[in-house]
Amino acid sequence: MTTTLITGATAGIGEATALRLAREQHRLIICGRREERLEVLAQKLLLEGATEVLTCVFDIRDREATSAMLESLPKEWQQIDVLINNAGLAVGLSTLHQGDTDDWERMIDTNIKGLLYVTRIIAPMMTQRNTGHIINVGSIAGREVYPGGNVYCATKHAVDAITKALRIELVEHNIRVTQIAPAATETEFSVVRFKGDEERAGKVYQGFDPLTGNDIADIIAFVISRPPHVNINDLFVTPTAQSTATNIIRKG
Ligand code: 8X3
């Protein structure tokens, strides 16, 4: 039985992945800030086939709350096989010289520091057992930079670097480390980036078929299900209509 912890499980790629892995009968630890959403999702996951579900409500930006929650997991939940560092967000699309420092803090604190806090606690549980799999959700923004992407791109480049470092450091512990780097994926991502402006967010995905949370969830399920001696290091996934961050072929 596989025990999998997913951060940012209340929406988007995280939620789709939780649902996908429930169908593979994983035991799931779902983490997020929004308690009500987590509880509703937990019920759905059990109906979909999850063996057991544990909900953990905390904000990964809060180091103390993250440690308090993850260091006190019930004993029967401490043998985590797969960690999916999915929580992340973009806020704003301003040039750096016009940027909002609060937006930068949110992105840096969630995408880099939060991922580090969670990994610092869960990875030692894996090294103790000499087994495990860490999957970091990166982005096309970790491969290139684009106008207005500045700090978001920097955070996802950091995820790329952290993933590579982890792979080198954890290989002697038989721990698989994978990065999945999606490009345009239609989730709440752009609504968050544009601070609730749904019209502007909708335009990001107009005129082409973007990726969906389910597309990425399928890939994550595939990566996890490889035999133990196979580690997929890195997958960069774009919609067919997209070749670079700024080159998307739109119809109509
Ligand atoms: C992927 C979305 O806006 O960087 O993280 O292409 S974007």
Image (spheres, helix red, strand yellow):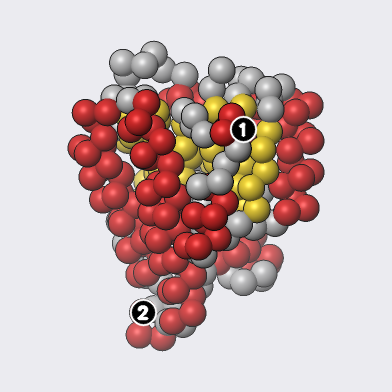
* Residue 116, x across and y down, in percent: 38, 54
Measured in 3D between alpha carbons, the distance from the residue under mark 2 to the one under mark 1, in whole angstroms, is 39 Å
Q: Nearer the viewer, residue 17 or 28?
A: 28
Disc 2 residue: CB within 8 Å of ligand 1? no
Q: Residue at x 48, y 39 (%)?
A: 84
Q: Quadrant of the N terminus?
A: top right
Residue contact between numbered discs 2 and 1, judged by CB atoms under 8 Å: no
Local crowd size for mark 1, using a 10 Å CA cut-off: few (<14), some (14–19), many (≥20)? many
Which label was assigned to residue 28? 1
Q: Residue at x 74, y 41 (%)?
A: 41
Local crowd size for mark 2, using a 10 Å CA cut-off: few (<14), some (14–19), many (≥20)? some
Residue type for callout 2: Leu
Residue at image mark 2: 96
Say what secondary structure mark 1 lies in. strand
Q: Residue at x 74, y 50 (%)?
A: 37
Which tag is nearer the camera, tag 2 or tag 1? 1
Q: Earlier in the sequence, mark 2 or mark 1?
A: 1
49 sits left or right of 188 in the view: right
